[in-house]
């Protein structure tokens, strides 16, 4: 019925967050950790205790550090596409994947990586990126609402059917969400 999943091959199995941060900071140092991970807990007043305190509270940062531990420090092969969205502690590492030597990291390589990330972010922003947030329904170039399609402010399609339906409602029900129910119960 249910298959037993073996997490024992995962390098994070049995390793606490404090031990993980200690191991990484002793091997690479806080400066390189900040350069590669871009987390301020490794830059501003860096210590194992303060970093662990921040990482315990912040899931996305902890997962970023755990992924760095697995794929840079333990030098495992890249994760498969179906396991990419699973947190590193929950990923299944097959028996044929063996832990390698820690990757040799330098500040020069980190600068190149940061330049590459900045270039990629600029390309993403230049193309408009994903459409979400407060200004998702507006055209960036003209500032006008998008024509047709889904209109976020009304929560439905922007066509004439919803306008004619709204005009038939009473004014009291438009300001009070329970207006229609109250009208029916009073009859």
Image (cartoon, grey):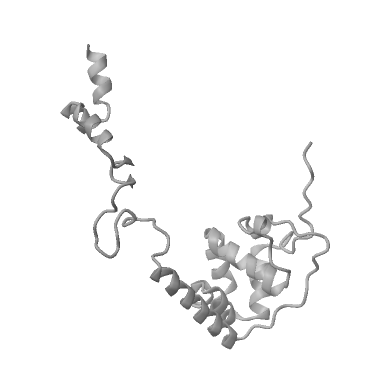
Which quadrant holds residue 142?
bottom left
- Which residue shows up at 53% across the image and 84% down it? 111
Q: Is residue 176 visible?
A: no
- Relative placement, left or right, of 38 versus 178 is right
In the image, 177: left or right of 57?
Answer: left
**x then y, percent, for residue 166:** 23, 31
* Residue found at the very far right of the displayed protein: 96
Name the spot of residue 4 as percent of width and height, x first. Answer: 79, 45
Residue closer to the observer: 159 or 186 = 159
Q: Is residue 136 shown left or right of residue 95?
A: left
Residue 31, percent from left and from top: 56, 82
Which residue corresponds to the image point at 58% horizontal and 66% vertical from the top-left?
Answer: 64
Q: In the drawing, does residue 122 fall left or right of residue 49? A: left
The quadrant holding residue 78 is bottom right
Q: Which of the image's four quarters has the C terminus?
A: top left
Q: Position of residue 155 (x, y in %)?
A: 33, 41
181 shown above or below 45: above
Give the residue at x 42% y 60%.
Answer: 130
Q: Nearer the viewer, residue 72 or 157?
A: 157
Extreme residue toward the top, this view: 187
Locate the N terminus and report the quarter of the image it occupies. Answer: top right
């Amino acid at each position: 019925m249910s298959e037993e999943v073996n997490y024992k091959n995962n390098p994070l199995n049995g390793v606490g967050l404090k031990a993980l941060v200690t191991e990484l900071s002793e091997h690479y140092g806080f400066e390189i950790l900040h350069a590669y991970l871009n987390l301020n807990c490794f830059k501003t007043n860096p210590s194992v205790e303060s970093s662990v305190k921040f990482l315990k509270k912040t899931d996305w940062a902890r997962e970023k550090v755990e992924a760095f531990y697995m794929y840079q420090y333990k030098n495992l092969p890249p994760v498969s596409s179906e396991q990419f969205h699973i947190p590193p502690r929950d990923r299944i590492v097959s028996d044929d994947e063996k832990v390698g030597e820690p990757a040799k990291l330098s500040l020069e390589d980190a600068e190149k990586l940061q330049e590459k990330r900045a270039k990629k972010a600029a390309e993403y922003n230049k193309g408009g990126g994903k459409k979400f947030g407060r200004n998702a329904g507006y055209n960036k170039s003209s500032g006008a609402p998008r024509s047709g399609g889904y209109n976020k402010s009304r929560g439905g399609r922007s066509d004439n059917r919803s306008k004619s339906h709204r005009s038939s409602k009473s004014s009291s029900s438009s300001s009070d969400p329970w207006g229609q129910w109250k009208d029916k119960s009073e009859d």
